[in-house]
Image (spheres, rainbow, N blue to C red):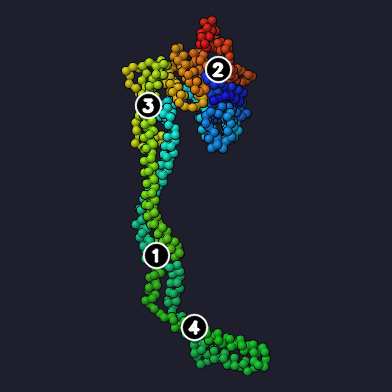
Protein backbone atom coordinates (compact mmCIF):
# COMPACT_ATOMS: atom_id res chain seq x y z
CA UNK A 1 0.00 0.00 0.00
CA UNK A 2 0.98 3.65 -0.44
CA UNK A 3 2.20 4.91 2.93
CA UNK A 4 3.68 8.30 2.06
CA UNK A 5 3.81 10.73 -0.83
CA UNK A 6 6.32 13.58 -1.08
CA UNK A 7 6.04 16.23 -3.80
CA UNK A 8 8.50 19.07 -4.49
CA UNK A 9 8.23 21.75 -7.17
CA UNK A 10 5.37 20.17 -9.10
CA UNK A 11 2.62 22.24 -10.79
CA UNK A 12 1.02 24.32 -7.98
CA UNK A 13 2.89 22.47 -5.26
CA UNK A 14 6.10 23.91 -3.83
CA UNK A 15 6.50 21.21 -1.19
CA UNK A 16 3.97 18.75 0.17
CA UNK A 17 4.06 15.53 2.20
CA UNK A 18 1.12 13.21 2.83
CA UNK A 19 0.94 10.10 4.99
CA UNK A 20 -1.68 7.61 3.85
CA UNK A 21 -3.42 4.92 5.89
CA UNK A 22 -4.98 1.63 4.96
CA UNK A 23 -8.71 1.46 4.24
CA UNK A 24 -10.67 4.19 2.47
CA UNK A 25 -9.04 7.64 2.23
CA UNK A 26 -11.07 10.54 0.81
CA UNK A 27 -9.65 13.73 -0.65
CA UNK A 28 -11.97 16.74 -0.92
CA UNK A 29 -11.64 20.40 -1.79
CA UNK A 30 -13.12 23.06 -3.98
CA UNK A 31 -12.84 22.82 -7.74
CA UNK A 32 -9.49 24.15 -8.97
CA UNK A 33 -7.60 23.72 -5.69
CA UNK A 34 -5.35 21.06 -7.19
CA UNK A 35 -6.76 17.70 -6.13
CA UNK A 36 -6.05 16.19 -9.52
CA UNK A 37 -2.50 17.60 -9.40
CA UNK A 38 -1.76 15.16 -6.60
CA UNK A 39 -3.12 12.40 -8.82
CA UNK A 40 -0.84 13.58 -11.63
CA UNK A 41 2.17 13.43 -9.32
CA UNK A 42 1.28 9.87 -8.37
CA UNK A 43 0.99 8.98 -12.04
CA UNK A 44 4.55 10.20 -12.59
CA UNK A 45 6.08 7.89 -9.99
CA UNK A 46 4.41 4.89 -11.63
CA UNK A 47 5.82 5.64 -15.07
CA UNK A 48 3.78 8.37 -16.82
CA UNK A 49 5.75 10.63 -19.17
CA UNK A 50 6.41 14.22 -18.12
CA UNK A 51 7.50 17.62 -19.49
CA UNK A 52 8.89 20.89 -18.11
CA UNK A 53 5.38 22.34 -17.67
CA UNK A 54 5.10 20.39 -14.41
CA UNK A 55 7.72 22.60 -12.71
CA UNK A 56 6.47 25.01 -10.04
CA UNK A 57 9.72 27.00 -10.30
CA UNK A 58 11.40 26.60 -13.66
CA UNK A 59 14.97 26.88 -12.34
CA UNK A 60 14.57 23.99 -9.88
CA UNK A 61 14.03 20.29 -10.45
CA UNK A 62 10.86 18.45 -9.52
CA UNK A 63 11.13 15.49 -7.13
CA UNK A 64 8.23 13.12 -6.45
CA UNK A 65 8.71 10.24 -4.06
CA UNK A 66 6.29 7.54 -2.95
CA UNK A 67 6.83 5.00 -0.16
CA UNK A 68 5.02 1.67 -0.49
CA UNK A 69 4.61 -1.15 2.00
CA UNK A 70 5.08 -4.25 -0.15
CA UNK A 71 5.87 -7.03 2.34
CA UNK A 72 2.84 -9.19 1.59
CA UNK A 73 2.66 -8.86 -2.20
CA UNK A 74 5.24 -11.45 -3.39
CA UNK A 75 7.45 -8.98 -5.25
CA UNK A 76 10.91 -10.24 -4.18
CA UNK A 77 11.35 -12.08 -7.51
CA UNK A 78 10.87 -8.80 -9.39
CA UNK A 79 13.69 -7.16 -7.40
CA UNK A 80 16.02 -10.15 -7.78
CA UNK A 81 15.33 -10.42 -11.50
CA UNK A 82 16.15 -6.74 -12.06
CA UNK A 83 19.08 -6.60 -9.61
CA UNK A 84 17.43 -4.03 -7.31
CA UNK A 85 17.77 -4.02 -3.52
CA UNK A 86 14.58 -5.28 -1.92
CA UNK A 87 13.01 -3.53 1.08
CA UNK A 88 9.63 -4.07 2.70
CA UNK A 89 9.26 -0.28 2.48
CA UNK A 90 10.05 0.43 -1.18
CA UNK A 91 10.56 3.96 -2.46
CA UNK A 92 9.74 5.00 -6.02
CA UNK A 93 11.23 8.35 -7.02
CA UNK A 94 10.98 10.51 -10.12
CA UNK A 95 13.12 13.57 -10.83
CA UNK A 96 12.47 16.05 -13.65
CA UNK A 97 14.99 18.80 -14.41
CA UNK A 98 14.30 22.16 -16.05
CA UNK A 99 15.22 20.78 -19.50
CA UNK A 100 12.46 18.18 -19.11
CA UNK A 101 14.88 15.28 -18.71
CA UNK A 102 13.65 12.72 -16.27
CA UNK A 103 15.29 10.16 -13.99
CA UNK A 104 13.62 7.27 -12.20
CA UNK A 105 14.72 5.36 -9.12
CA UNK A 106 13.56 2.30 -7.18
CA UNK A 107 15.13 2.20 -3.71
CA UNK A 108 17.77 4.68 -4.93
CA UNK A 109 18.71 2.41 -7.85
CA UNK A 110 18.45 4.24 -11.21
CA UNK A 111 16.00 2.43 -13.52
CA UNK A 112 14.45 3.09 -16.92
CA UNK A 113 10.88 4.33 -17.23
CA UNK A 114 9.63 0.96 -18.46
CA UNK A 115 10.86 -0.80 -15.32
CA UNK A 116 9.37 1.89 -13.07
CA UNK A 117 6.03 1.44 -14.85
CA UNK A 118 6.25 -2.35 -14.56
CA UNK A 119 6.60 -2.13 -10.76
CA UNK A 120 4.11 0.77 -10.53
CA UNK A 121 1.47 -1.33 -12.27
CA UNK A 122 1.89 -3.96 -9.54
CA UNK A 123 1.46 -1.38 -6.76
CA UNK A 124 -1.04 1.21 -7.88
CA UNK A 125 -4.04 1.54 -10.19
CA UNK A 126 -5.19 5.07 -11.00
CA UNK A 127 -8.73 5.52 -12.23
CA UNK A 128 -9.40 9.03 -13.53
CA UNK A 129 -12.34 10.40 -15.50
CA UNK A 130 -10.57 10.18 -18.83
CA UNK A 131 -9.69 6.54 -18.13
CA UNK A 132 -13.41 5.69 -18.31
CA UNK A 133 -12.86 5.56 -22.08
CA UNK A 134 -10.66 2.50 -21.52
CA UNK A 135 -13.77 0.49 -20.62
CA UNK A 136 -14.51 0.45 -24.36
CA UNK A 137 -11.10 -1.05 -25.08
CA UNK A 138 -11.26 -4.75 -25.98
CA UNK A 139 -7.90 -5.48 -24.31
CA UNK A 140 -9.16 -3.92 -21.06
CA UNK A 141 -12.39 -5.92 -21.26
CA UNK A 142 -10.46 -9.15 -21.83
CA UNK A 143 -8.13 -8.33 -18.92
CA UNK A 144 -11.16 -8.00 -16.60
CA UNK A 145 -12.33 -11.49 -17.50
CA UNK A 146 -8.82 -12.88 -17.08
CA UNK A 147 -8.47 -11.19 -13.68
CA UNK A 148 -11.69 -12.82 -12.57
CA UNK A 149 -10.82 -16.21 -14.11
CA UNK A 150 -7.55 -16.27 -12.11
CA UNK A 151 -5.52 -18.11 -14.76
CA UNK A 152 -2.46 -15.86 -14.95
CA UNK A 153 -0.06 -18.85 -15.07
CA UNK A 154 -1.92 -20.26 -18.07
CA UNK A 155 -1.86 -16.87 -19.81
CA UNK A 156 1.85 -16.49 -19.07
CA UNK A 157 2.50 -19.93 -20.57
CA UNK A 158 0.42 -19.07 -23.65
CA UNK A 159 2.19 -15.74 -24.18
CA UNK A 160 5.60 -17.38 -23.86
CA UNK A 161 4.64 -20.05 -26.42
CA UNK A 162 2.98 -17.48 -28.67
CA UNK A 163 6.17 -15.37 -28.82
CA UNK A 164 8.18 -18.47 -29.73
CA UNK A 165 5.54 -19.40 -32.33
CA UNK A 166 5.73 -15.92 -33.92
CA UNK A 167 9.53 -16.03 -34.00
CA UNK A 168 9.61 -19.48 -35.58
CA UNK A 169 6.94 -18.53 -38.11
CA UNK A 170 8.92 -15.42 -38.99
CA UNK A 171 12.02 -17.60 -39.50
CA UNK A 172 9.98 -20.05 -41.62
CA UNK A 173 8.71 -17.23 -43.85
CA UNK A 174 12.23 -15.86 -44.24
CA UNK A 175 13.55 -19.31 -45.22
CA UNK A 176 10.71 -19.78 -47.72
CA UNK A 177 11.44 -16.39 -49.22
CA UNK A 178 15.13 -17.32 -49.52
CA UNK A 179 14.17 -20.65 -51.08
CA UNK A 180 11.81 -19.00 -53.60
CA UNK A 181 14.51 -16.53 -54.54
CA UNK A 182 17.08 -19.31 -54.86
CA UNK A 183 14.73 -21.47 -56.94
CA UNK A 184 13.94 -18.54 -59.22
CA UNK A 185 17.68 -18.36 -60.01
CA UNK A 186 18.25 -22.12 -59.87
CA UNK A 187 18.01 -22.87 -63.62
CA UNK A 188 20.32 -20.01 -64.59
CA UNK A 189 22.81 -20.83 -61.82
CA UNK A 190 22.76 -24.50 -62.87
CA UNK A 191 23.52 -23.45 -66.47
CA UNK A 192 26.39 -21.23 -65.33
CA UNK A 193 27.84 -23.94 -63.10
CA UNK A 194 27.60 -26.59 -65.86
CA UNK A 195 29.31 -24.19 -68.26
CA UNK A 196 32.20 -23.61 -65.84
CA UNK A 197 32.48 -27.29 -64.96
CA UNK A 198 32.50 -28.24 -68.64
CA UNK A 199 35.24 -25.71 -69.26
CA UNK A 200 37.34 -27.46 -66.56
CA UNK A 201 39.72 -24.53 -66.26
CA UNK A 202 42.82 -25.01 -64.09
CA UNK A 203 44.25 -22.16 -61.99
CA UNK A 204 47.35 -21.35 -64.18
CA UNK A 205 45.91 -22.48 -67.51
CA UNK A 206 45.45 -19.02 -69.04
CA UNK A 207 49.07 -18.00 -68.46
CA UNK A 208 50.38 -21.32 -69.72
CA UNK A 209 48.34 -21.10 -72.96
CA UNK A 210 49.36 -17.51 -73.58
CA UNK A 211 53.03 -18.44 -73.12
CA UNK A 212 52.80 -21.50 -75.41
CA UNK A 213 50.98 -19.51 -78.12
CA UNK A 214 53.65 -16.84 -77.97
CA UNK A 215 56.26 -19.51 -78.68
CA UNK A 216 54.26 -21.27 -81.42
CA UNK A 217 53.40 -18.04 -83.21
CA UNK A 218 57.12 -17.12 -83.30
CA UNK A 219 58.46 -20.67 -83.76
CA UNK A 220 60.21 -20.18 -87.15
CA UNK A 221 62.08 -17.08 -86.05
CA UNK A 222 63.03 -18.67 -82.73
CA UNK A 223 64.35 -21.85 -84.47
CA UNK A 224 66.33 -19.80 -86.97
CA UNK A 225 68.03 -17.75 -84.27
CA UNK A 226 68.73 -20.74 -82.06
CA UNK A 227 70.27 -22.59 -85.03
CA UNK A 228 72.49 -19.61 -85.77
CA UNK A 229 73.54 -19.62 -82.13
CA UNK A 230 74.56 -23.31 -82.09
CA UNK A 231 76.27 -23.00 -85.51
CA UNK A 232 78.39 -20.08 -84.33
CA UNK A 233 79.20 -21.80 -81.10
CA UNK A 234 80.33 -25.24 -82.32
CA UNK A 235 79.29 -26.17 -85.92
CA UNK A 236 81.28 -23.72 -88.13
CA UNK A 237 84.89 -24.59 -88.95
CA UNK A 238 86.01 -21.55 -86.99
CA UNK A 239 83.45 -22.00 -84.25
CA UNK A 240 83.81 -20.25 -80.96
CA UNK A 241 84.35 -23.35 -78.83
CA UNK A 242 87.20 -24.55 -81.10
CA UNK A 243 88.94 -21.15 -80.91
CA UNK A 244 88.54 -21.01 -77.12
CA UNK A 245 89.90 -24.57 -76.84
CA UNK A 246 93.16 -23.44 -78.61
CA UNK A 247 93.42 -20.49 -76.22
CA UNK A 248 92.89 -22.82 -73.27
CA UNK A 249 95.78 -25.04 -74.54
CA UNK A 250 98.09 -22.00 -74.72
CA UNK A 251 97.42 -21.21 -71.09
CA UNK A 252 97.79 -24.84 -70.07
CA UNK A 253 101.46 -24.95 -71.26
CA UNK A 254 102.46 -22.48 -68.60
CA UNK A 255 99.98 -23.37 -65.86
CA UNK A 256 102.67 -25.24 -63.93
CA UNK A 257 105.08 -22.37 -64.31
CA UNK A 258 103.02 -19.49 -63.00
CA UNK A 259 100.28 -19.86 -60.37
CA UNK A 260 98.12 -17.06 -61.77
CA UNK A 261 98.20 -18.63 -65.25
CA UNK A 262 97.09 -21.91 -63.65
CA UNK A 263 94.08 -20.20 -62.14
CA UNK A 264 93.14 -18.61 -65.45
CA UNK A 265 93.50 -21.99 -67.17
CA UNK A 266 91.10 -23.55 -64.69
CA UNK A 267 88.57 -20.78 -65.26
CA UNK A 268 88.92 -21.20 -69.01
CA UNK A 269 88.26 -24.96 -68.71
CA UNK A 270 85.09 -24.27 -66.69
CA UNK A 271 83.93 -21.75 -69.29
CA UNK A 272 84.37 -24.24 -72.11
CA UNK A 273 82.36 -26.86 -70.21
CA UNK A 274 79.57 -24.35 -69.56
CA UNK A 275 79.48 -23.18 -73.19
CA UNK A 276 79.30 -26.76 -74.38
CA UNK A 277 76.32 -27.41 -72.05
CA UNK A 278 74.62 -24.23 -73.23
CA UNK A 279 75.10 -25.29 -76.83
CA UNK A 280 73.53 -28.68 -76.10
CA UNK A 281 70.55 -27.10 -74.33
CA UNK A 282 69.95 -24.61 -77.14
CA UNK A 283 70.11 -27.43 -79.65
CA UNK A 284 67.49 -29.42 -77.72
CA UNK A 285 65.21 -26.40 -77.48
CA UNK A 286 65.58 -25.70 -81.19
CA UNK A 287 64.73 -29.31 -82.03
CA UNK A 288 61.68 -29.27 -79.70
CA UNK A 289 60.16 -26.24 -81.38
CA UNK A 290 58.09 -26.81 -84.45
CA UNK A 291 55.40 -24.81 -86.23
CA UNK A 292 52.04 -26.59 -85.48
CA UNK A 293 48.99 -24.77 -86.97
CA UNK A 294 46.55 -27.31 -85.48
CA UNK A 295 48.00 -26.84 -81.98
CA UNK A 296 47.82 -23.07 -82.42
CA UNK A 297 44.14 -23.29 -83.40
CA UNK A 298 43.29 -25.53 -80.45
CA UNK A 299 45.08 -23.28 -77.97
CA UNK A 300 43.52 -20.15 -79.48
CA UNK A 301 40.03 -21.67 -79.19
CA UNK A 302 40.74 -22.63 -75.57
CA UNK A 303 41.99 -19.12 -74.78
CA UNK A 304 38.94 -17.55 -76.48
CA UNK A 305 36.69 -19.68 -74.23
CA UNK A 306 38.54 -18.48 -71.13
CA UNK A 307 38.31 -14.83 -72.28
CA UNK A 308 34.57 -15.17 -72.94
CA UNK A 309 33.97 -16.64 -69.48
CA UNK A 310 36.02 -13.86 -67.88
CA UNK A 311 34.03 -11.24 -69.76
CA UNK A 312 30.70 -12.97 -69.03
CA UNK A 313 31.32 -13.03 -65.29
CA UNK A 314 32.99 -9.60 -65.33
CA UNK A 315 36.26 -10.71 -63.75
CA UNK A 316 39.91 -10.43 -64.80
CA UNK A 317 41.53 -13.62 -63.51
CA UNK A 318 40.91 -17.35 -63.84
CA UNK A 319 41.10 -17.74 -60.06
CA UNK A 320 38.07 -15.45 -59.78
CA UNK A 321 36.16 -17.75 -62.15
CA UNK A 322 36.99 -20.67 -59.87
CA UNK A 323 35.64 -18.71 -56.87
CA UNK A 324 32.41 -18.02 -58.81
CA UNK A 325 32.16 -21.70 -59.67
CA UNK A 326 32.46 -22.63 -55.98
CA UNK A 327 29.87 -19.98 -55.04
CA UNK A 328 27.38 -21.29 -57.63
CA UNK A 329 27.90 -24.81 -56.33
CA UNK A 330 27.20 -23.62 -52.76
CA UNK A 331 24.04 -21.76 -53.85
CA UNK A 332 22.65 -24.84 -55.52
CA UNK A 333 23.52 -26.95 -52.49
CA UNK A 334 21.80 -24.39 -50.24
CA UNK A 335 18.49 -25.08 -52.00
CA UNK A 336 18.73 -28.69 -50.84
CA UNK A 337 19.73 -27.67 -47.29
CA UNK A 338 17.07 -24.92 -47.25
CA UNK A 339 14.41 -27.43 -48.13
CA UNK A 340 15.56 -29.63 -45.26
CA UNK A 341 15.69 -26.69 -42.85
CA UNK A 342 12.20 -25.53 -43.94
CA UNK A 343 10.78 -28.96 -43.20
CA UNK A 344 12.38 -28.92 -39.73
CA UNK A 345 11.12 -25.41 -38.87
CA UNK A 346 7.66 -26.11 -40.30
CA UNK A 347 7.45 -29.15 -38.07
CA UNK A 348 8.38 -26.99 -35.07
CA UNK A 349 5.81 -24.32 -36.09
CA UNK A 350 3.06 -26.94 -36.44
CA UNK A 351 3.99 -28.48 -33.09
CA UNK A 352 3.97 -25.06 -31.40
CA UNK A 353 0.65 -24.18 -33.03
CA UNK A 354 -0.93 -27.40 -31.78
CA UNK A 355 0.38 -26.61 -28.32
CA UNK A 356 -1.12 -23.11 -28.52
CA UNK A 357 -4.49 -24.54 -29.53
CA UNK A 358 -4.49 -26.79 -26.49
CA UNK A 359 -3.59 -23.95 -24.12
CA UNK A 360 -6.00 -21.48 -25.75
CA UNK A 361 -8.80 -24.03 -25.45
CA UNK A 362 -8.22 -24.17 -21.68
CA UNK A 363 -8.10 -20.36 -21.53
CA UNK A 364 -11.35 -20.08 -23.52
CA UNK A 365 -13.08 -22.56 -21.21
CA UNK A 366 -12.01 -20.53 -18.17
CA UNK A 367 -13.23 -17.31 -19.79
CA UNK A 368 -16.56 -18.82 -20.82
CA UNK A 369 -17.02 -20.14 -17.29
CA UNK A 370 -16.25 -16.70 -15.80
CA UNK A 371 -18.50 -14.68 -18.13
CA UNK A 372 -21.92 -15.63 -16.64
CA UNK A 373 -20.58 -15.04 -13.12
CA UNK A 374 -19.22 -11.61 -14.09
CA UNK A 375 -22.46 -10.63 -15.83
CA UNK A 376 -24.47 -11.62 -12.75
CA UNK A 377 -22.24 -9.71 -10.30
CA UNK A 378 -22.05 -6.57 -12.50
CA UNK A 379 -25.84 -6.47 -12.96
CA UNK A 380 -26.35 -6.88 -9.23
CA UNK A 381 -23.88 -4.07 -8.54
CA UNK A 382 -25.54 -1.79 -11.14
CA UNK A 383 -28.92 -2.45 -9.52
CA UNK A 384 -27.49 -1.32 -6.18
CA UNK A 385 -26.09 1.78 -7.89
CA UNK A 386 -29.49 2.90 -9.16
CA UNK A 387 -29.81 1.19 -12.54
CA UNK A 388 -32.46 -1.41 -11.65
CA UNK A 389 -33.21 -2.47 -15.22
CA UNK A 390 -29.56 -2.69 -16.26
CA UNK A 391 -28.65 -5.22 -18.93
CA UNK A 392 -25.01 -6.21 -19.16
CA UNK A 393 -23.80 -8.88 -21.55
CA UNK A 394 -20.34 -10.08 -22.47
CA UNK A 395 -20.17 -11.12 -26.11
CA UNK A 396 -17.69 -13.91 -26.86
CA UNK A 397 -16.40 -14.96 -30.27
CA UNK A 398 -13.47 -17.03 -31.49
CA UNK A 399 -10.87 -15.45 -33.74
CA UNK A 400 -9.52 -17.36 -36.72
CA UNK A 401 -5.97 -16.45 -35.78
CA UNK A 402 -4.09 -16.30 -32.50
CA UNK A 403 -3.08 -13.05 -30.84
CA UNK A 404 -0.92 -12.59 -27.75
CA UNK A 405 -4.03 -13.07 -25.56
CA UNK A 406 -5.37 -16.21 -27.23
CA UNK A 407 -8.09 -16.54 -29.86
CA UNK A 408 -11.05 -15.00 -28.01
CA UNK A 409 -12.77 -11.75 -28.97
CA UNK A 410 -14.67 -10.07 -26.13
CA UNK A 411 -17.21 -7.24 -26.26
CA UNK A 412 -19.10 -5.56 -23.41
CA UNK A 413 -22.74 -4.77 -24.27
CA UNK A 414 -24.96 -2.59 -22.08
CA UNK A 415 -28.39 -1.06 -21.85
CA UNK A 416 -29.75 0.82 -18.85
CA UNK A 417 -33.43 0.46 -19.84
CA UNK A 418 -35.83 -2.45 -19.65
CA UNK A 419 -36.65 -3.81 -23.08
CA UNK A 420 -33.73 -1.98 -24.68
CA UNK A 421 -31.28 -3.77 -26.91
CA UNK A 422 -27.78 -4.02 -25.39
CA UNK A 423 -25.18 -2.31 -27.52
CA UNK A 424 -21.58 -1.10 -27.42
CA UNK A 425 -20.80 1.08 -24.42
CA UNK A 426 -19.45 3.97 -26.48
CA UNK A 427 -22.77 4.49 -28.25
CA UNK A 428 -25.34 3.60 -25.60
CA UNK A 429 -24.07 4.54 -22.09
CA UNK A 430 -24.04 8.02 -20.52
CA UNK A 431 -21.09 9.35 -18.50
CA UNK A 432 -22.81 8.59 -15.20
CA UNK A 433 -23.70 5.07 -16.32
CA UNK A 434 -20.14 4.46 -17.47
CA UNK A 435 -18.82 5.68 -14.09
CA UNK A 436 -21.08 3.27 -12.23
CA UNK A 437 -20.26 0.43 -14.59
CA UNK A 438 -16.53 1.06 -14.13
CA UNK A 439 -16.96 1.14 -10.36
CA UNK A 440 -18.82 -2.18 -10.51
CA UNK A 441 -15.99 -3.66 -12.54
CA UNK A 442 -13.28 -2.32 -10.22
CA UNK A 443 -15.21 -3.63 -7.25
CA UNK A 444 -15.41 -7.03 -8.91
CA UNK A 445 -11.69 -7.35 -9.60
CA UNK A 446 -10.71 -5.90 -6.20
CA UNK A 447 -12.00 -9.13 -4.65
CA UNK A 448 -9.84 -11.24 -6.95
CA UNK A 449 -6.79 -9.09 -7.56
CA UNK A 450 -4.05 -8.58 -5.00
CA UNK A 451 -3.34 -5.05 -6.25
CA UNK A 452 -2.41 -3.06 -3.11
CA UNK A 453 -3.86 0.35 -3.96
CA UNK A 454 -6.52 1.83 -6.23
CA UNK A 455 -7.15 5.55 -6.64
CA UNK A 456 -10.40 7.01 -7.98
CA UNK A 457 -10.64 10.53 -9.34
CA UNK A 458 -14.30 11.60 -9.26
CA UNK A 459 -15.74 8.11 -9.75
CA UNK A 460 -18.92 9.79 -8.50
CA UNK A 461 -19.34 11.74 -11.75
CA UNK A 462 -23.00 11.82 -12.77
CA UNK A 463 -24.37 10.43 -9.49
CA UNK A 464 -25.91 12.06 -6.42
CA UNK A 465 -28.22 11.53 -3.46
CA UNK A 466 -29.00 7.97 -2.50
CA UNK A 467 -26.88 6.54 -5.32
CA UNK A 468 -23.87 8.52 -4.07
CA UNK A 469 -24.30 6.73 -0.75
CA UNK A 470 -24.35 3.41 -2.58
CA UNK A 471 -21.14 4.36 -4.40
CA UNK A 472 -19.58 5.21 -1.05
CA UNK A 473 -20.70 1.87 0.39
CA UNK A 474 -19.09 -0.04 -2.48
CA UNK A 475 -15.86 1.93 -2.09
CA UNK A 476 -15.89 1.23 1.63
CA UNK A 477 -16.42 -2.47 0.95
CA UNK A 478 -13.53 -2.49 -1.54
CA UNK A 479 -11.26 -0.92 1.08
CA UNK A 480 -11.59 -4.06 3.24
CA UNK A 481 -9.42 -5.91 0.69
CA UNK A 482 -7.15 -3.09 -0.49
CA UNK A 483 -6.19 0.53 0.05
CA UNK A 484 -8.67 2.83 -1.68
CA UNK A 485 -8.06 6.57 -2.20
CA UNK A 486 -10.93 8.65 -3.60
CA UNK A 487 -11.03 12.23 -4.86
CA UNK A 488 -14.66 13.29 -4.50
CA UNK A 489 -17.10 16.22 -4.43
CA UNK A 490 -19.88 14.25 -2.80
CA UNK A 491 -20.46 14.40 0.99
CA UNK A 492 -22.07 10.95 0.96
CA UNK A 493 -18.76 9.46 -0.23
CA UNK A 494 -16.59 11.72 1.93
CA UNK A 495 -18.47 10.49 5.00
CA UNK A 496 -17.47 6.88 4.27
CA UNK A 497 -13.73 7.56 4.50
CA UNK A 498 -11.66 6.21 7.34
CA UNK A 499 -9.17 9.02 6.61
CA UNK A 500 -10.04 12.45 5.22
CA UNK A 501 -7.79 14.99 3.51
CA UNK A 502 -8.69 18.51 2.38
CA UNK A 503 -6.91 20.25 -0.50
CA UNK A 504 -6.74 24.06 -0.43
CA UNK A 505 -5.11 26.76 -2.47
CA UNK A 506 -3.40 29.91 -1.17
CA UNK A 507 -1.41 32.82 -2.61
CA UNK A 508 2.20 33.26 -1.52
CA UNK A 509 3.82 36.34 -3.07
CA UNK A 510 3.45 36.01 -6.80
CA UNK A 511 2.66 32.32 -6.64
CA UNK A 512 -0.46 30.27 -6.07
CA UNK A 513 0.24 27.03 -4.28
CA UNK A 514 -1.69 23.90 -3.37
CA UNK A 515 -1.74 22.50 0.18
CA UNK A 516 -3.19 19.32 1.65
CA UNK A 517 -4.18 18.65 5.24
CA UNK A 518 -5.41 15.60 7.08
CA UNK A 519 -8.51 16.50 9.10
CA UNK A 520 -10.08 14.85 12.14
CA UNK A 521 -13.67 14.48 13.32
CA UNK A 522 -14.76 18.09 14.08
CA UNK A 523 -12.96 19.41 11.02
CA UNK A 524 -14.53 16.63 8.99
CA UNK A 525 -17.99 17.60 10.15
CA UNK A 526 -17.33 21.19 9.09
CA UNK A 527 -15.88 20.11 5.71
CA UNK A 528 -18.77 17.74 4.91
CA UNK A 529 -21.31 20.38 6.05
CA UNK A 530 -19.63 22.83 3.67
CA UNK A 531 -19.89 20.27 0.87
CA UNK A 532 -23.60 19.92 1.66
CA UNK A 533 -24.55 23.59 1.81
CA UNK A 534 -21.71 25.57 0.28
CA UNK A 535 -20.04 28.24 2.43
CA UNK A 536 -23.07 28.47 4.76
CA UNK A 537 -22.58 25.76 7.37
CA UNK A 538 -26.19 25.63 8.58
CA UNK A 539 -27.28 23.67 11.61
CA UNK A 540 -29.10 21.17 9.43
CA UNK A 541 -25.99 20.71 7.26
CA UNK A 542 -23.88 20.05 10.35
CA UNK A 543 -26.40 17.50 11.65
CA UNK A 544 -26.49 15.80 8.28
CA UNK A 545 -22.67 15.76 8.20
CA UNK A 546 -22.65 14.05 11.60
CA UNK A 547 -25.12 11.47 10.35
CA UNK A 548 -23.00 10.78 7.27
CA UNK A 549 -19.90 10.29 9.43
CA UNK A 550 -21.76 7.99 11.78
> How far is mark 2 from mark 4, CA to CA?
120 Å
Residue appearing at x 45%, y 67% in the figure: 203
- Residue 408 occupies quadrant: top left
Whole-percent x, y for residue 255 in the image:
64, 92
Q: Position of residue 238 (x, y in %)?
A: 53, 92
Of circles 1 and 3, the one toward us is 3
Q: Nearer the viewer, mark 4 or mark 1?
A: 4
- Given this view, does label 3 or label 4 mark the residue nearer the observer? 3
Label 3 – label 4 distance at C-alpha? 107 Å
Provide residue 544's location: percent of width, then percent of height. 51, 8
Of labels 3 and 2, earlier in sequence is: 3
Q: Earlier in the sequence, mark 2 or mark 1?
A: 1
Residue situated in front as seen by the camera: 20 or 482? 482
In contact (CB < 8 Å): disc 1 and disc 3:
no
Report the mark closest to the observer, 2 or 4: 2
Residue beneath the point at 39% across and 71% down: 300
Residue pointed to by mark 2: 499
Task: Kindly report which numbered mark, 2 or 1, lies closer to the viewer in this rendering.
Answer: 2
Q: Is residue 316 above or below residue 10?
A: below
Q: Sequence order check: which comes first, mark 3 or mark 4?
A: 4
Q: CA distance from mark 3 to mark 2?
A: 36 Å
Is tag 4's residue or tag 1's residue first in the polypeptide sequence? Answer: 4
Label pair 4/1, CB-CB below 8 angstroms: no
Rounded to the nearest angstrom, the CA distance separating label 4 from label 1 is: 37 Å
Which residue is under mark 4? 282
Q: Quadrant of residue 196?
A: bottom left
Q: Which residue is mark 1?
A: 308
Up the image or down, 233 lies above or below 525; here it is: below
Q: Which residue is mark 3?
A: 371
Amino acid sequence: MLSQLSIQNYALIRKLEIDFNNGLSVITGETGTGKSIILGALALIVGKRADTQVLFEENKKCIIEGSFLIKNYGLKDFFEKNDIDYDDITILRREINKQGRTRAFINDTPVNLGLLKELGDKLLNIHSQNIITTINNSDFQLAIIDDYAQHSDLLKLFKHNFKEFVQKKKLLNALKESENKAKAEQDYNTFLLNELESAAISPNEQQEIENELEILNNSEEIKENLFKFTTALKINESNLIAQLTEIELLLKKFSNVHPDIKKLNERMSSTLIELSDISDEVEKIEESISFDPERINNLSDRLDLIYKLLQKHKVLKVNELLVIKESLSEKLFEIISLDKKIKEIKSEVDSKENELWKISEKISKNRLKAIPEIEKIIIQSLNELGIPEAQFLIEHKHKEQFTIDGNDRIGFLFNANKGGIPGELSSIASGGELSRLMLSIKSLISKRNLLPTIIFDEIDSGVSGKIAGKVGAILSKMSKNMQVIVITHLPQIAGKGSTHYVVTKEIEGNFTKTLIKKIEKNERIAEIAKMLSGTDKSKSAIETAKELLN
